[in-house]
Image (tube, rainbow, N blue to C red):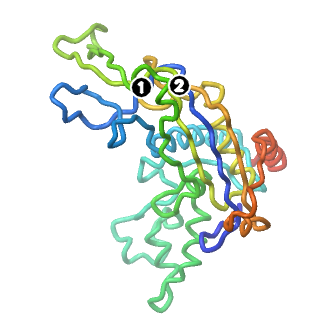
Amino acid sequence: MTLHSFWHFENRWLITATLRMKTALSVGARASLMPTGSDLPVIKTPEGIPFIPGSSLKGVVRAYTERLLRTMDELKQTRQGERLWACDPLDERERCVIAKCGEHCENCKGNCCRDCGRCKNCMVRRATQNNRLDDEKLTQEIWQCSCTACRLFGSPWLASRISFQDAMLSNRDNLLRLTELRDGVGIDRDLGSAKSGIKYDFETVPAGAEFGITIVVENADEWEVGLLLLALEAMRKGELPVGGKTTRGPGWGEIVNLKIQKVGMENFLDYLTGTGQPAEIWNSELLQRLATALQQGGSHA
């Protein structure tokens, strides 16, 4: 896999779409400060307009992509001989690159334990000569150890190459109301019935709400964008929910008006100066490039 540098421009992918909610949406904020506010309000702009944080969208897309990559890894799928996989970013010991491999890591020369090869602290020491850090060598080593998901979505050691903007409500004037209140109750897991004294309400954005999605991908190969599109394809089919309480109804929608544009080395000056437009790429073309890359990669033993 290519080590993409952030020091220069290679390409930029602009992905826009509309998320049209088929059911209500619950994207919670902290408890309301209003005396009669909801127990679980939706997040809103200072003007009181609901929106979907870019972090929520990125979390949904990343989690889905990680599931796909773990399945590819189980199937021994590779690309150009390299493993396609995803670590567990929420478990320090299961990350592809860990912060510290042992209690005496500070004195490690790069071979104190079996985890040295994926320990950032050890990598820094290996990349330091005469008290001078070789940043390029360190970056190369972190990149080689990082899983496919972290290389694309980022990690504590690698910057993400995908940026998700906050998805703003785009059809405000077509909605009868911006939010609705729903009742909820706590369930006694032993009895399987409502638990006494645990009743609450939560706020949702009504079905029919539409949110504008904008995703910017920097310095990515076509197959990597195709991998990202697999998650958007699931959302297009209405198979990937967003927000909270999705198992009880809210959060189901569909992607419409998907548009993908690419700015490359050949047209980036025209794009920056406003004298040219990015090239539009069909999502089916990128998905085909991903399929071709996987077919050529085969599987590893």
Extreme-front residue of the structure = 173
Q: Amino acid at mark 2?
A: Met
Labels 2 and 1 touching (C-beta < 8 A): yes
Q: Is residue 31 left or right of residue 244?
A: left
Q: Which mark is residue 21?
A: 2
Quadrant position of the N terminus in the picture:
bottom right
Q: Position of residue 82 (x, y in %)?
A: 72, 56
Q: Which mark is residue 205?
A: 1
In-front residue for pair 185/165: 165
Q: Name the residue at 47% across, 45% down.
A: 166
Q: Position of residue 155 (x, y in %)?
A: 49, 57
Q: Residues within 10 Å of mark 1 (few under 14, many from 20)?
A: many
Q: Which mark is residue 48?
A: none
Q: Position of residue 95 (x, y in %)?
A: 48, 53
- Element under label 2? strand
Extreme-bottom residue of the structure = 130
Q: Is residue 110 left or right of residue 17?
A: left
